[in-house]
Image (cartoon, grey):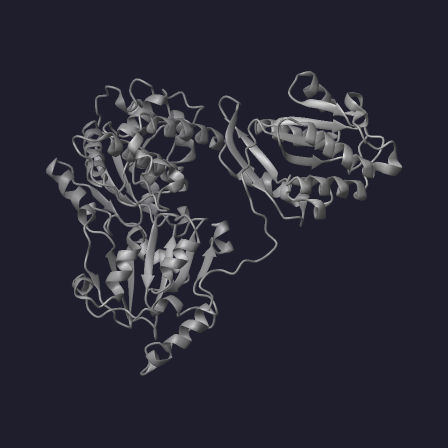
Amino acid sequence: MEAFPAPVPGASLLLSFKPVKKNVLIIGGNNIAAKRAFAALEAEANVLVLVRGGLDAACEELRWRANQGQLALFDLDSLPCSSAGPSDHWRDANAVDSFIYMQPEKMRLVCITDTVSSPNAAYRRTYESAREIAQKCGHRSIPVNVTDMPDLCDFTFMSTQRFVDAETGTSTPLQVGITTNGHGCRLAGRIRRDIVASLPKEIGGSVTKVGRLRELAQVAIPEDAVEIPELNEDGAPVTPNEPVPQRKQEETATERARRRMKWVAQVSEYWSIRRLAHLTDAQMDAILDGREGLISTSSSVRNTDSPTPSVGDSDISTSQHDLDLTPSRRGRILLVGSGPGHPSLLTVATHAALTKHADLVLSDKLVPEAVLALVPPGVEVRIARKFPGNAEGAQMELMEAAIEAANRGLTVVRLKQGDPTVYGRAGEEVIYFRARGFEPVVVPGVSSVLAGPTFAGIPVTQRGAAESFIVCTGVGRQGKEVKLPGYERGRTLVILMGVARLPQVLDTLQTGDAESAGRRDGPAYPSHTPIALIERASMPDQRVICSTLKDISAALESVGEQRPPGMLVIGWSVLSLWERGDMTILEDGAETHDEERVKGWLGEKLWRVSEGLNAEWESW
């Protein structure tokens, strides 16, 4: 069996190339040449253009850019060795080669665009002439793109979009590109447009603001901190929830820089695009400091047409609820479950709490934007600033905020993912609020313990495969390890919050040494036991990775970045509904066929990855 996915030919190696102050040569004076020139200019390249007939034969845009000094335009006919007419265009290869040789700086890319008809061009370059130029460039190790001649191309151009800031109209660093690898260029443009149309208009601004946040986070980074992965998001762990030490009263410069970059990763992963796009410098400072109160999302962010005052730079918590109001009624607190994530799985009570009763919503960071979007404009929404190592302080921050608002007569909705009582710390909050004179109303939610496996096509119980199930957490209070249940063939094990500690979980479940056995209550799990890792259950970008305990770590590594939140489902129910189903798992002697059973499930591969939801859910 293959340990890793087999490469399938036909793809491109997608790169983000930035030829700052490097030479890019474009041959041709048509509109395609102008598009290539503009793209290269935005990448800060030195653009050189060769046009037969010179400036007068170039399209209007190239003439304008040349007159503005943005690029250098040369007459191909005036070069030594250039062709004298349409019959001997092959001589252009020598002219182009000499031109490249005479440049003081190396040419990084060459784009041949006059291979297509153009109103301004008196001729169209032949295949033979383009091939000769491409070969000359190849001898100099210069990548070439030839329009409409893919067999001569070392690289191709994707259908791209550069986003602008919705407020200022200026270009942002965000770009997206689509390629069909030659199987439909026009379709690629349509797909790009559809993707762009589906994204929030603030998405470009959010990238600009996160870039600014990274700059602030890295201010005064000590020289000895360059080897710390968290100081560079690209080198950081693939899960943003890998624990960091609790914050100390006195931090070293390295510890401070590490914590600040952790905040950048957290807000990039969990905050809505709209909130990121509207961050002020004061709010950024407060986020990175970690000592200020909750960042407020007021109606000015949620609805720019609202007359509600905006979040001020001088007081990041300012909103309409901070005015000196005399309560007309006693406030109340609702502990509300938002379900696994899909808005259609909200209970009627939860929907009413968000849309009719809430004056303030205090939300866990994992509650998706699609649910928060139901909150009416004018109702303040605050997002928990939790990450491993900071959970205790953030939890207290939320509870204090709820009491403060309730004392002002507001109805506070404390919004939690799933069900509040399933690892949602609802019990702690009930006791805390009760001690301060408020008896909270607990509104149940659809738990991800049940909904997550169901969305992945996995029953937690199944006649003939799983007679019971057990739920546990992968991490105890303050990051301590928890004792996991031992193996029972007819039982499904569901582990929440265990993906970040997957190696420790697997070691505890499988190994028989004394230390691991002490962290497990019962016999070890066979290494071929099926397991499913379900990420962002019920959301459009849901991902399910199915494998065995032996190979799940390699499977997770192969798929790249993780998508919190994730859960683990372990046991024979994982494969019980695959294709024709298997209800013989609990029959006498069935374990002797387990390896054959697993092979029939996974085929020749060691794991299987499925993306997205059943298409039927798009209509809900």
Identify the residue at image location x=38%, y=33%.
376
- Looking at the image, residue 397 sits to the left or right of residue 221; the answer is left
- Is residue 260 positioned above or below 428 on the image? above
In x, y percent, where is residue 162? 56, 32
Identify the residue at image location x=68%, y=44%.
153
**Quarter of image, res 351:** top left
The one nearer the camera, 232 or 94, is: 94
In x, y percent, where is residue 514? 16, 65
The one nearer the camera, 620 or 612, is: 612
The one nearer the camera, 182 or 71, is: 71
**Quarter of image, res 247:** top left
Question: Can residue 62 be seen at all in this image of the molecule?
Answer: yes
In x, y percent, where is residue 61? 71, 23
Identify the residue at image location x=47%, y=30%.
202
The one nearer the camera, 459 or 352, is: 459
**Quarter of image, res 9:** bottom right
In x, y percent, where is residue 599? 43, 72
Q: How many labels does the image show?
A: 0
- Is residue 99 positioned above or below 230 on the image? above
Question: Can residue 360 be seen at all in this image of the molecule?
Answer: no
Identify the residue at image location x=80%, y=32%.
118
